[in-house]
Amino acid sequence: MRALIERLMRPEIRALNAYHVPEATGLIKLDAMENPYLWPESLTSEWLDALRVVALNRYPDPSGRVLQETLRETMAIPDDMGLLLGNGSDELIQMLALAVAKPGRTILSVDPGFVMYRMIGLFAGMDYVGVPLAADDFSIDLPATLEAIERTQPSLIYLAYPNNPTGNRFDADDMVRIIEAAPGLVIVDEAYSPFTDSSFLGLLGDWPNLLVMRTVSKMGLAGLRLGYLAGPTDWLTEIDKVRLPYNINVLTQTSAIFALQHKSVLDAQTHAIRVERARLFESLTRIATLHAYPSDANFILVRVPEGQANPLFTGLRERRILIKNLHGAHPLLHDCLRLTVGLPEENAALIAALQALLA
């Protein structure tokens, strides 16, 4: 069997490790940038009533027309722009790669960044170029990025706004320079838009090669796996050709429409997360041995004393707190941990555990 696997499977796929999601049962879960708040019981009951009339024996609307209309209204998507739905942002990233992939074609992004840009590009047979961010503040190294664009002529450029895993929001003028220099598409990934007041969504149409990608995961609907891509209709018509039929199931469509009709509840929750982010950041800065980086997302990147990332990760887990250990993921993330903003009591438990471990 092993010989057959080695003969059939692409060597670059065999060299990969599958994306790992750690077991979190019974833990304070601060590793995955999820909204920790539940819905009020009354709203949950209304949602379940909506699900009772769903026809599970029928295929869903293939384009999710009502869901698209609801997204356009609640997210202020420009009327003259196209809209495409994906099973999370990951499927949209996959669609984009499949639509443009040819031997020798390149995806470019900044590093450290969202790992799926590179992984999905590799799945599609594309090359990946990652331009390192500035070491001191994780800002875009504009000269290096423009040089890499000129040298590699990427078909796709991804810019996360704010960036994951660093949490910072890039300078908008730098991003405009990249959009104008790009020979292909530039996708601004606004997965963390609920936690910042800046967006490129209203600028769609100003450049013919700009697309904006978002997800409803971070605003409190991670379990639905719903992402959306907005941009000029001509582009989205072509990308839609590689979308699998019925990719957004009927339960997701019904649930997302219901949730977006009650967006004020989700907005109140994301506002509470913003407030807690400020409190958590202030608490982290009081721990002298930690360096917390400012964040426009729902997590905070922290650099810990040299050699302490692994022991702190293990020590927190022993105290039933799960975070993301980024040490070893990229040279710029040496000794770094990523902390999702949780409930007030969860954040307090995290700070108390860090203080005890670093005492």
Image: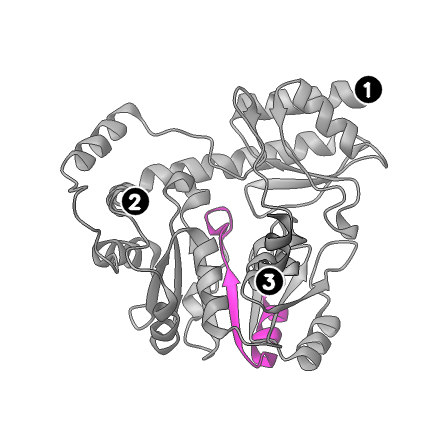
Residue 94 is situated, as x and y percent measured from the top left of the image, at 48, 61
Residue 80 is situated, as x and y percent measured from the top left of the image, at 30, 73
User: What is the residue that sits farthest to the right in this orientation?
Assistant: 306
**Amino acid type at mark 2:** Thr
Tally the marks: 3
Q: Nearer the viewer, mark 1 or mark 2?
A: 2
Q: Is residue 183 magenta?
A: yes
Confirm or deny contact between disc 1 and disc 3 (CB under 8 A): no
Q: Earlier in the sequence, mark 2 or mark 3?
A: 3
Residue 115 is situated, as x and y percent measured from the top left of the image, at 61, 53
**Residue 121 versus residue 299 in the image, above or below:** below
For residue 114, say whether it is visible.
no
Q: Marks 2 and 3, Cα distance to the nearest angstrom? A: 29 Å
The residue singled out by tag 2 in the image is 252
Q: Quadrant of the C terminus?
A: top right
Mark 3 burial class by Cα count in 10 Å: few <14, some 14-19, many 20+: some
**Amino acid type at mark 1:** Ala
- Segment tinted magenta in the rendering: 172-197
The residue singled out by tag 3 in the image is 122
In the image, taking residue 85 as reference, residue 171 lies left or right, namely right
**Amino acid type at mark 3:** Leu
Residue 130: image quadrant is bottom right
Colouring convention used in this rendered image of the protein: one colour
Secondary element at image label 3: helix
Secondary element at image label 2: helix
Confirm or deny contact between disc 2 and disc 3 (CB under 8 A): no
Secondary element at image label 1: loop
The residue singled out by tag 1 in the image is 359
